[in-house]
Image (cartoon, helix red, strand yellow):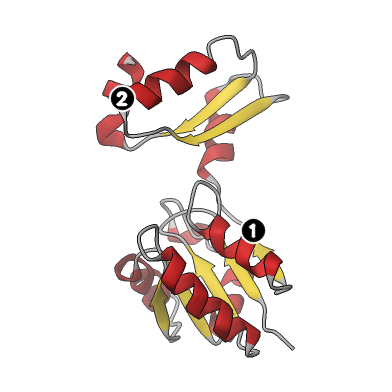
């Protein structure tokens, strides 16, 4: 029987937002797959969690994903964490979730902070209907084309952008 992959939401700025269930889950799995092990080790140390960490991020997701799936299929359980927020949302974790689905590996979400929904709640913009566009392309041309395709969108739009790129994106 295969193990389970747990998607564990991590704090987006305040360690006090980390739930007891998240701590319990990270403490009970066999290993933790992390976007940036240097960031995750700080979180784990804060909560006294000692588990093996493996790296899983955009540039190693194929090779690392295969290794994670093999371990899950052998019966181990794993948690996937991103640097901040819920893994698999504008995150390479979506590929790992797809692999789990293709291999009938159960996936459980341990909910918590989500930057997109927090930003929507704080914005004061209409929240009944909204669209999430994630990160835009780093190519100026592709980014401009994507933004142009959204010109007539009437729903509130949520777009992720790095702070140092925000002004340039707003100019587009």
Who's the residue at 52% across and 57% down the image?
17
Q: Position of residue 51 (x, y in %)?
A: 45, 86
Provide the secondary structure element on which disc 1 rests.
loop
Q: Name the residue under label 2.
A: 140
State whether residue 116 appears in this view: yes
Q: Which residue is drawn at 61% across and 77% down?
A: 25
Callout 1–callout 2 Cβ contact below 8 Å: no
Q: Residue placed at 38% from the left, 69% from the top?
A: 40
Left or right of 39 in this view: 134 = right
- Cα separation, mark 1 vs mark 2, equals 34 Å
Labels 1 and 2: the sequence-earlier one: 1
Residue 100 marker: none
What is the crowding at mark 2: few (fewer than 14 residues within 10 Å), some, or many (at least 20)?
A: few
Nearer to us in this view, 24 or 145: 145
Residue in the picture at 35% in, 18% down: 170
Residue 59 pos. (x, y %): 35, 60
Give the labeled residue for mark 1: 111
Q: Is residue 141 above or below residue 92?
A: above
Q: Under tag 2, what secondary structure?
A: helix
């Amino acid at each position: 029987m295969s193990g389970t992959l747990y998607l564990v939401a991590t704090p987006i700025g305040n360690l006090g937002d980390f739930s007891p269930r998240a701590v319990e889950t990270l403490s009970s799995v066999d290993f933790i797959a992390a976007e940036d092990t240097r960031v995750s080790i700080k979180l784990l140390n804060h909560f006294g969690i000692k588990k093996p960490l493996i790296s899983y991020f955009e540039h190693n997701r194929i090779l690392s994903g295969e290794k994670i799936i093999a371990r899950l299929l052998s019966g181990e359980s794993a948690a996937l964490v991103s640097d901040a927020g819920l893994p698999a949302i504008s995150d390479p974790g979506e590929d790992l979730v797809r692999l789990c689905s293709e291999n009938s590996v159960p996936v459980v979400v341990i909910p918590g902070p989500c930057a997109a929904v927090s930003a929507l709640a704080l914005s004061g913009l209409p929240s009944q209907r909204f669209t999430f566009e994630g990160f835009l392309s780093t190519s100026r041309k592709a980014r401009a084309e994507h933004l142009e395709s959204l010109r007539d969108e009437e729903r509130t739009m949520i777009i992720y952008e790095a702070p140092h790129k925000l002004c340039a994106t707003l100019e587009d």
